[in-house]
């Protein structure tokens, strides 16, 4: 059997040692494991940011990888801890707060049951999507001697990830559930002005990813209205644009960028802002 | 034999490649090893920060783990390089400047020989505590071809950690010592006003950990005076509080927090500030 | 065969998951591998910063280590992807934009073919230096199903690194090339005022590394003029200086520092600024 892989995605930051405490909990249960940090620099309690990052990265790992994601404003409350498994052959462990929305929705960029009548990225309850299964972790039955009220990353999610990586089946962790929490990602809508999408993520370079997936990008020439700018056409690379540009980025979404600059700052773009594509 | 584990705790930051140079020094000596970063984002030269983080994390690793900690304002001076081993079954390598204080003191939160007459977190010399042994590394006898005056992390501590992880005994590194340097952590004191503790650590979320350990927290209802606020009672989870709250956090100390906010900023709390618990 | 090692050096930051996408691409091709982050916090698109860090760290890894470096303002343009192998027994993969300059030049600190008539750190084309070989990756022939125009770290460099770590020879990746891009590092020059070097790197602590390598440092007493300060003599350790000091640092270059302070800020030093050593 190849060495199991566990990835970690959190908002714990690097300075306080919280990710290391999770790794200690894993290594105490399974010693021969490859640990990969997806990121620990999710902005504090920004579930949507974590969801986007995990959505772009997780399915690229070998099948069977266990992804442990902990951005958890509701730690210690009644929110469930879930394990989810889907058609991509990966296994996910984390709070049931929408953190796996992009993992579920990324092919096409629209979350199942989402709606334009609900605020962008708002939480809602949805039936577990086709092809997926989800289980609620039975925390009371866990092998941990201690489960704190404040650090389920260490006391619940990491131990469950270690057990799954060691070969336990998700069904050993708890009961199947029929519903999960998702973030509202209804995708762009057609209007008389054109295709109206929204900025859903801004990366380190200031590139602003919209919710307009590759398959919705018009084939011919178009203009994109983003922030204070009208951008003509589609670039094939970051280096080829003069001034602000539009590109289908590596995650598959239409993205606004400025070569060598920061598009979000220069164009005044934030998450949730509308972007219009006009043929 | 399971794969040995070495953890790294430094103030080297991520940008300059210093932790990677330590890992190169380790991997050149022991190839089959699990390397875990506890943190490299200790504020520059903040030995107390590193001590707290390591204290909360280290004992959670499997027994036999080697913890290499390098926050070392005195590099190149006469301060000793030490190896320490204690009742927790872990092995510690680093400068003899108090960086292992919390590792030694965490059960109860009081450093052996500490005193209310000495400034909070000040350095002092203490007898090696019961159950512990410490050795001074004989740097002149090291196998390294080169020992720089500026980077003992790479040239002394990492090589020693690699040797220990590979099975060398601490006694091979140098002579036993009778005293080590600790940071002054005398714990809270009773006064007419109540139990007076101090803030000893502020984490990424702005949570302010005091030096009042779980076993000193009064059983019934109490008020906590912290910064500009009086907090009523004890919360069971971060999510359950309205406004500022008090909780026994995952490290075992009483902690001041604001749900979804930054307690240190909002209450004006810094390391060393007094916090009063009044029944 | 020992477990192969791949190191990663990028400007991708930690927050967006880009390094994890590279690791996924590697682990999908080679499962038994040690992954080491040199840094992902290179300032965006700062090729010279990455070059310096990699130069100080790479050669310290065991021979055969594959170093994958991606700071790539020209991604998607015509710049080549190269593999380079040199007398240090290491293998390098990255864009042909000068990112391996310090790796090649570090013994002595001068890049082959560099000139005082060209701006400091400017790009130029140079013959592949003696003892080195370089190959241009044939991207069209890659095994990846998909090569995006925006993320060669994931789609080109990581897959090539994985193949090399798995035992493929560089010649399998593409054709030998005769020239590579380097950054102009001509080293210090003698003048009537003394030896005039430049600041080439500023680290987390504010230490300012010059381009004056150890072997060019005068043997006797000297003064160093740096920013707004004249520094007398050479320190043997950071702790031993009073105020600003000069030291031959662990990377081998003369460095300006302030004990417990930030030399770059306090002396007003930036990359490219002149530093004069006067006997």
Image (cartoon, coloured by chain):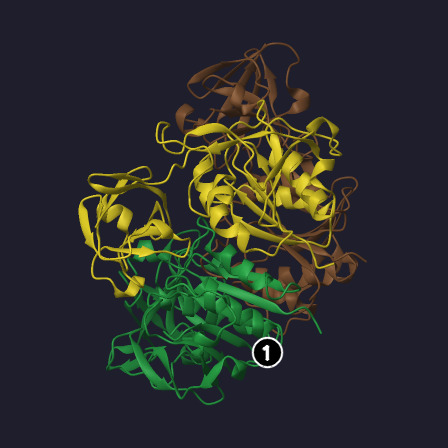
Chain colours: A green, B yellow, C brown
* Chain letter, disc 1 residue: A
- Residue drawn at x 52%, y 71% as measured from the top left: A143
In this view, the residue in front, B230 or C119, is B230
**How many marks can you see?**
1
In percent of width and height, residue C157 lies at: 63, 59
In this view, the residue in front, C158 or A220, is C158
**Figure quadrant of residue C261:** top left
In percent of width and height, residue B137 lies at: 67, 32
Q: Is B61 placed above or below B83 here?
A: below
Residue C10 visible in the snapshot: no
- Residue drawn at x 45%, y 38% as measured from the top left: B111
Q: Is A71 placed above or below B256 here?
A: below
In this view, the residue in front, A244 or A174, is A174
Q: Is residue B161 left or right of A246 when viewed as pictured?
A: right
Residue B57 visible in the snapshot: yes
Q: Is residue B46 left or right of B146 when viewed as pictured?
A: left
- Residue drawn at x 44%, y 36% as measured from the top left: B46
Neighbour tally class for label 1: few under 14, some 14-19, many 20 plus, Cα within 10 Å: few
In percent of width and height, residue A27 lies at: 60, 61
For the C terminus of chain A, the image quarter is: bottom left
Q: Is B83 placed above or below C223 here?
A: below
Q: Quick one: SS at disc 1?
A: loop
Where does label 1 land, which residue?
Answer: A168
For the N terminus of chain A, the image quarter is: bottom right
- Residue drawn at x 60%, y 76% as measured from the top left: A64
In percent of width and height, residue C250 lies at: 62, 31
In this view, the residue in front, A49 or B233, is B233
Q: Is B117 placed above or below A176 here?
A: above
């Amino acid at each position: 059997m190849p060495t199991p892989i566990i990835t970690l995605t959190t908002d714990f930051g690097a300075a306080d040692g919280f990710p290391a405490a999770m790794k200690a909990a894993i290594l105490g249960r399974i010693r021969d494991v490859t640990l990969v940090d997806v990121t620990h620099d999710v902005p504090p309690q920004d579930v949507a940011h974590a969801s986007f990052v995990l959505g772009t990265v997780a399915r690229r790992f070998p099948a069977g990888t266990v992804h442990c994601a902990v951005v958890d404003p509701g730690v210690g409350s009644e929110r469930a801890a879930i394990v989810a498994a889907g058609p991509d052959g990966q296994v996910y462990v984390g709070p049931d707060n929408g953190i796996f929305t992009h993992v579920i929705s990324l092919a096409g960029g629209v979350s199942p049951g989402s709606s334009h009548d609900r605020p962008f990225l708002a939480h809602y309850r949805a039936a577990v999507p086709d092809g997926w299964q989800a289980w609620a972790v039975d925390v009371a039955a866990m092998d941990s001697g201690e489960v704190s009220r404040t650090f389920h990353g260490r006391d619940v999610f990491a131990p469950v990830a270690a057990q799954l990586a060691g070969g336990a089946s998700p069904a050993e962790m708890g009961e199947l559930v029929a519903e999960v929490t998702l973030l509202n990602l209804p995708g762009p809508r057609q209007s008389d002005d054109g295709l109206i999408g929204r900025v859903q993520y801004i990366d380190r370079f200031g590139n602003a990813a919209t919710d307009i997936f590759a398959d919705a990008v018009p084939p011919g020439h178009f203009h994109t209205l983003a922030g204070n700018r009208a951008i003509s056409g589609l670039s094939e690379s970051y280096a080829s644009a003069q001034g602000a540009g539009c590109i289908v980025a590596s995650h598959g979404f239409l993205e606004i960028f400025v070569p060598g600059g920061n598009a979000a700052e220069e164009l005044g773009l934030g998450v949730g802002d509308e972007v219009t594509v006009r043929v």
